[in-house]
Amino acid sequence: MVFISLLGVIFIKTLKFIFTLWVGKALMLFCNIFAKGRGTNMPGAKANLLMPDFIGNFKGIDVDKVIFITGTNGKSTANNMVVHALRSAGKTVCSNLEGANMIGGIATALIRNSTLTGKMKTEYFSFEIDERSMEHIYKHIPARRVCVTNLQKDQVQRNGEPDYIFQKFKRVFNSDMTLFLNNGEPRAKAFEDLTNSVVYYGVGKTKYSFTKDKFYDVTMPCPKCNDKIIFDYYNVDNVGKFHCAGCDFASEEKVDFLAENVEFSDNSSFDCNGYRFTVTNNEPFYIFNYALCIAVCNSLGISNEELQKGFSNFKNIGGRMETLKYKTKTLKYIRIKQENPETLQTALDYIAKDPSEKILLMGLEELKDFDPYYTNTFYAFDVDFESLKKNNIKHYICFSEAVAYDTANRMIYAGIAPEDISILPNDSDEAILKELDKFPIDNVYLITWLKKYNELEVSTKVYGEEK
Amino acid sequence: MANTLNITWLYPDLLNLHGDRGNIMAFEKVGKKMGLDVKINRIDTFSQEIDFDNSDIIFMNVGEIKTVKSVVENIKKYGNAIYDFVEAGKPVIAIGTTGAVLIDKTTRADGSVVEGLGIIHAEAVERKAIYGDDLHICLTEDNSFELMAVQIHLIDFFLKDENDALCKIIYGKGNNDKDTTEGGKYKNAIFTNALGPVFVKNPWYTEKIINEALKAKGLEVAEPIEESFFEIERNSFKTIGAFIKQKTE
């Protein structure tokens, strides 16, 4: 009797799953026809509403072949790279490459890559995972390979402080998984205590490595003892060779997958475990992603030769740099994530490498992702603007309805002369472009959030064509 | 010869969450404008000595909640020094969650309790949900003295006596969801939820705190800074005020 009841429960659950899956597939079809752009998350999100454990019911998922990539910065790029490398090696991969990294996005990817009965059609699964969603997703899909790129200040209105996410991860990470940890980022590395299976990856000292020794330079508390973390050098902001002033916590001397002897050019190259890789991206932070990709793919049996084949034609999806034409000017747009100092610092460092005359359009803008909207710009004080002073920037234009003055003030604190800054306390594209017209310099950098860029993409065409 | 203002910046690397090194930059900038020789002494590690005798202001920026215990333990190593400092009317400033260092105790989300220094009588409770918003406040002692900031709220503060509030709320959350208090004060020891950095965005308050430090040191307060020095911050205050007004209409 109990057996029959059990069979009944399983049957009903299976029926419910199939029904939910079909709803998801129907919604996906609908999105493909009528609402392109919503099809990366919505079908899965609705399926999860109908059946909260939906993603745990797909058949044919070998958790040994599931990779979760999480962290504050770099997870999209690293995931794109891993998926590209696996596919180049002839493997089939299910992924959320479009960046929908919460449970809805994962469910959508599974719906897309499954049969009508919920059997998966791919061998491998590589997902970018939102930090706050890790616990929920792992409960249903216990991945055996989990990668942490870094854990830094980000979206404080949701995440508060890095330790908030650190504690969430601690509740999930366990000895059943292999952790792939960034050896140069203290919080990521500190997860090493949670499993015996750790793979460290990193980047050796490069020509772009730097030290910080100015009076106002600050680092971070040790994730283990709370004393000061000291960086012997940085490869990118807050990542490098480090040790703690109060305990023996430090980056490893021997790193499992270390990209070293890095030569930066249009075809950058580096050594990793005796193999010289040539790659298509030449920014320092990309090299970390390559090292992680090699570590993960090697662990899955992909050879260095196969990886190199993939790297030679890798193009990142949804990169953070675009170009706009406006009259005779070229606007080089560098996308930042608001409330994320690392992306702002990376943008400024990128501009600092261009020695030619230029104008900087800076729109930090109000925060409008979550209710209530607010005017946070304090992350700009986590960032060093000093490099801009000696960088041939002829004029700065700070715009935004509410925070243009605060943005300009941060620059003034960095020593930029007030007379070199235009402050536009409004968000009008026309006003921004009119101000830009005043300066006979065609090389313009634009730093703002994606929404404002999308608006300016239209406006530069409209106002650029006016006689 | 210029008077010297000695600021002790406690644990800048450990208490480094929301760009608050800007607060120290603001004290340096405003102090210099007031004609002072501003000396800032960083205490970077727990093994480094705090020189209470040669400090006029002690400053602690926002850190992760987990750092509160370590900071309290290290300050307690100096016995009564911090309490004597406060009783002498010298400013001790704690920003954001670091306010938990100055109060009686904080209950964390896991139920553990972190003892504070007990300088300002209040208790705190770690919240389940984080809340971020603008924060428009006025000083309890002078309602016409307004400050603009933002707040990332991870712990609720509950003052034992609401008269100990540093500020009243004009817009925003402040200490908790239950009363309209913001921050806390005992003599010139203060904690505030205001971020921004708050002393960058409100240099008139920076000037006020410096004058309190000068008084405690037995010096005369400085000549008021001319209003034009605050032009960019006053304009910021107005534009953010208008932004808040849109939210409340």
Image (spheres, rainbow, N blue to C red):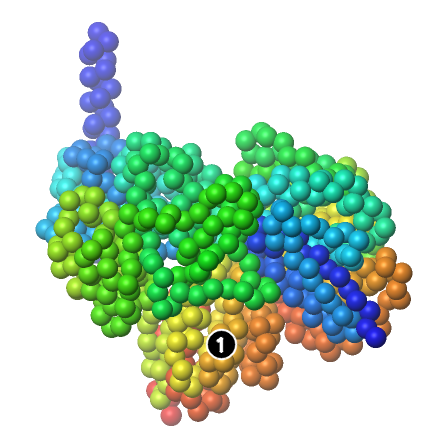
Instruction: Find residue B189 and report its horizontal and vertical position in percent.
Output: 77, 50
Furthest residue in direction left, as rendered: A90
- Above or below, A107 relative to B195: above
- Above or below, B133 relative to A419: above
- Above or below, A118 relative to A279: above
On screen, residue A410 versus residue A32, left or right, reads right
Which of the chains bears the disc numbered 1? A
For the residue pair A32 and B202, the one nearer the viewer reads as: B202
Q: Is mark 1 on a helix, strand or loop?
A: helix
Which residue is labeled 1 in the image? Answer: A388
User: Residue visible at 69% across and 50% down?
Assistant: B49
On screen, residue A138 versus residue B5, left or right, reads left
- Callout 1, which amino acid? Leu
Asked whether residue A161 appears in the rendered view, the answer is: no
For the residue pair A71 and A60, the one nearer the viewer reads as: A71
For the residue pair B91 and B208, the one nearer the viewer reads as: B91
User: Residue visible at 43% across and 60% down?
Assistant: A234
Instruction: Find residue A357 and report its horizontal and vertical position in percent.
Output: 42, 86
On screen, residue A159 versus residue A102, left or right, reads right
Instruction: Find residue B175 and report its horizontal and vertical position in percent.
Output: 68, 45
User: Residue visible at 41% across and 57% down?
Assistant: A240
Q: Quadrant of the N terminus of chain A?
A: top left
For the residue pair B104 and B184, the one nearer the viewer reads as: B104
On screen, residue B198 versus residue B220, left or right, reads left
Neighbours of disc 1 within 10 Å: few (<14), some (14-19), many (20+): some
For residue B29, which quarter of the picture? bottom right
Asked whether residue A274 appears in the rendered view, the answer is: yes
Instruction: Find residue A61 and report its horizontal and vertical position in percent.
Output: 19, 36
